[in-house]
Amino acid sequence: MAQLLQIHEPGQTPAPHETDSPVAVGIDLGTTNSVVAVAEDGAINVVRDENDKALVPSVVAYAADGSAIVGELARRLLLDRPEMVVSSIKRLMGRGLEDVKSLAGTLPYDVEPASDSGSGMVRLAVAGYTRTPVEVSAEILKALKERVEDHLGSSVDRAVVTVPAYFDDAARSATKDAARLAGLEVLRLVNEPTAAALAYGLDEGAEGIYAVYDLGGGTFDISLLRMEKGVFQVLATGGDAALGGDDFDNAIAEFFLADRRARFGDEHLNSSDAKVALMSARLAKECLTKQKTGEWSIEANDKTSLHVLNRTRLEKLIAPYVDRTIKLCRDALADAGVTTEDINGVVLVGGSTRVPLVRRRVSELFGREPLADINPDEVVAVGAALQAKALTVGSDMLLLDVTPLSLGLETMGGIVDKIVPRNTPIPVARAQEFTTYHDGQTAISIHVLQGEREMVDQCRSLAHFELHGIPPMVAGAARIRVTFAVDADGLLTVSAREHSTGKEQHVEVKPSYGLSEDEMARMLYDSMQHAGDDMTRRLLAETRVEAKRVINAVEAAMAADGDLLDDQERAAIGKAVGIVESTIAGNDRGAVSAAVEGLEHATKEFAERRMDRGIRRALRGHDVREFDEPTATTGEAGGE
Amino acid sequence: MHDIGTKPDDRLSASVDVAIGSVSPCWSCRGPVVNGDVFCGTCDAVQPPGQLDHFRRLGLKPGFNVDVAILNRLYFDCQRRLHPDRFASRTPRERALSQQQSTSVNEAYETLRDPLKRADYLVHLQGSGVLTEGCNLVADQELLTESLELRELLAEAETIAEVAALEKRAANDIKSCIDDLSRAFADVRLEQACRLTTRLKYLKKLEDECRVRRACLSDRVS
Ligand SMILES: [Zn+2]
């Protein structure tokens, strides 16, 4: 299922999180590198390979048979067989073609035009195959899943996955789809700076307001959080989902290529040449964090060129991007209503914060040295694992996050009417009333957008959908209440109700940048032979959780109002509970459901007596909770 | 006007005093639950949020003076019990209800932490039936003139210092306006509270515009 807009009623959300394996892991799915961490024996362990490396390069190479190689091996293939390799795929998550940046007019990907399926998701041609960003990301997630399974010696099927705070709904949905394709249920999408703050705050016992400056390979986030006794409250977040170390690489590569043109004249470059130039640029950037100057080569069209770059020149090249991050920090401070004096500490996250110019500018802005006593590459995965533990085992800490971007609707004249402003605490729900403009109109078209600008074409289009089946009435008589809910993952759900008739309306949703339901189903089918088994297992788990809930409720009611039952009735209910318990131990979902139904039937009259007593007490003006005279009530019940 | 179930006109009709004390069946154990209770007293199942005013939802007495530290503490307490993260391994129904509860708590917090939204809400809460026109329609020549004058000053300001001075003036006016609001609500002078809320609205807007203008000017300098 494409998760862009899940339309469902309360109580019908997807499968519960109780499955057979209790372990849930934390995954930082990065633009350049990814990391997986897991809570074990009270500690959080970052999973490392045999060379003690935690970072898995987010690079996927496709072999001729379509099989994928992920990580360091794929990264090494980038120079020799660039046409087989995809890197920085995160930049394309939930994006349209117009979002892809080019290098000297050449994209470092071979992009295919969108298919006729109608969704605008970018498709890549790699090693003779067509792949979506969701599929490529799923390969990375699968590799991380295998890594942690090898480490634990058991299977893992649930994870907390981090996303940039500034990721929009489409990119979040795409990330969730990728996890699903990799066989991982996403317990929660957590914003990267929030995860970092969690790891940092819990580790250092930090209290007060902290700024988390997170500059990764492809994304920039600034989050301001209040940390107080285990609560992590995001006050404001800002950023740019297309600003990161990759831009530094791009600027350096452009510089190298201009240098090359000056020597060799104009030459034709293909996407593989672009990848080679970017690789040299990246090496230059990394070297110049330690040394002052160096020389790098670019090989293309059988000609090798050498390029000198020193740190001063590098800083000039990347300054515009760093300036932009500083401006976004100022905006976030204003949004949070705090000044730099209110900040108790600045935490640096992301590999790109190793660049000296970045550190210098951040120190200048906040008037203090940033905290660097944590590994900026691993802290996000540690935070994700902490949250995974909190969601499964339980914890005292609590994350309170916000919407990074405003949510709005298109109104007359292409203007966006903001429904949920940015930095609103989530979960959030807002309703909007719509009506018809023509007599007998039976459908209304709604356009949902995300972004801060005022005009429709300046915001990201999330979805167009139509409300059908409105009963024909005179213009303006219909009252359709559309509710937009953003859940704790930052994902949007839309539901609609026609008021004048009270009829719930079906909402048709066409995701602008997501995968269609058919595409997702095909991918799941292609990737997992066991999809059917998986579904059965999940449904059984869901039914068990529900059955346990019913038993708990009955037992609590017996403890509170058992005096309303005679011995025979008590025995009958006890027997019904026993049947449910024995079916829970088995694997027959139908049997569990039937036993639960039997128990509900056996307690029906008991429930009625309890309600009756409750109402009587309320009428007498007593609070039920204070009422305590167990002996006097048996007679009351007998009279029913 | 976008918020759910809390349009000004139905705030009072959802009178808490009527609801409290009466009972409804718990969806889980089917026994009685006192209306307004967040959890079932018997089986502990989370209940639907129901109709509560924003103050009572967080455990505050309705009134304009809200201690932000206390508000934060109450808000955190509510979310510690109700946030969906606390229900991750529960049944779908419980998770959906916790999301609804958590959403209602966030809405209450969002409204009460900002003096302007709080004043606006309180005027509607206490003034429903009294001020039929609603707050926005208070036409006051004096207010209008003041607003126009300040806007003109901002339009004429050309240096960062000038804008900053105006911003400071707006901030001071906001402070005194909030003090006046506090007194008006204490004395139950609703029309005065309404007028002050309108004044606070444009002062805040002016402050925002000053900030944007100052950012523009400083960008130009650097
Ligand atoms: Zn109950």
Image (cartoon, rainbow, N blue to C red):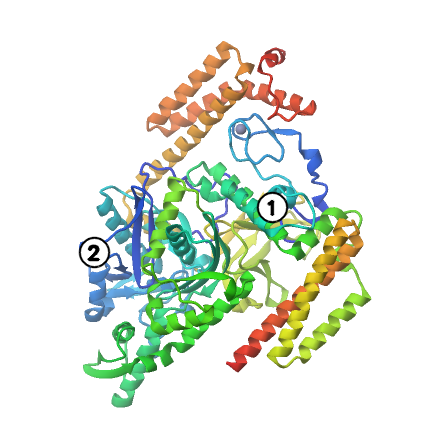
- Closer to the chain start, of discs 2 and 1, is 2
Q: Position of residue B23 (x, y in %)?
A: 63, 29
Tell me if mark 2 has few (under 14), some (14-19) or many (20+) residues whose alpha carbon lies within 10 angstroms of its own: few
Residue A109: image quadrant is bottom left
Which amino acid, by three-letter code, is at mark 1? Arg
**Observer able to see residue A522:** no
Q: Is A471 or B209 nearer to us in this picture?
A: B209
Residue designated by label 2: A52
Secondary element at tag 1: strand
Q: Which of the two marks, 2 or 1, is nearer to us in this view? A: 2
**Label 1, residues with CA under 10 Å away: few <14, some 14-19, many ≥20:** many
Identify the image quadrant of the C terminus of chain A. top right
Q: Callout 2: residue from which chain?
A: A
Q: Foreground residue, B66 or A532?
A: B66
In this rendering, would B67 be left or right of A597?
A: right
Q: Residue at x 71, y 62 (%)?
A: B176
Please report the residue visible at 27 percent of the width from the left and 44 percent of the height from the top. A529
Q: Is residue A514 above or below residue B8?
A: below
CA separation in Å, label 2 and label 1: 56 Å
Q: Where does residue A25 sit, x and y in percent of width and height?
A: 32, 47
Q: Can residue A131 be seen from the camera position used here?
A: yes
Which disc number belongs to residue A451? none
The secondary element bearing badge 2 is classed as loop
- Report the amino acid beneath label 2: Asp
The location of residue A478, given as percent across then percent down, is 67, 49
User: Residue A20 lies in what quarter of the image?
Assistant: top left
Which residue is nearer to you in this view: A598 or A420? A420
**Disc 1 chain ID:** A
Q: Residue at x 44, y 74 (%)?
A: A323
> Does the beta carbon at disc 2 come under 8 Å from ligand 1?
no
Residue named by callout 1: A497
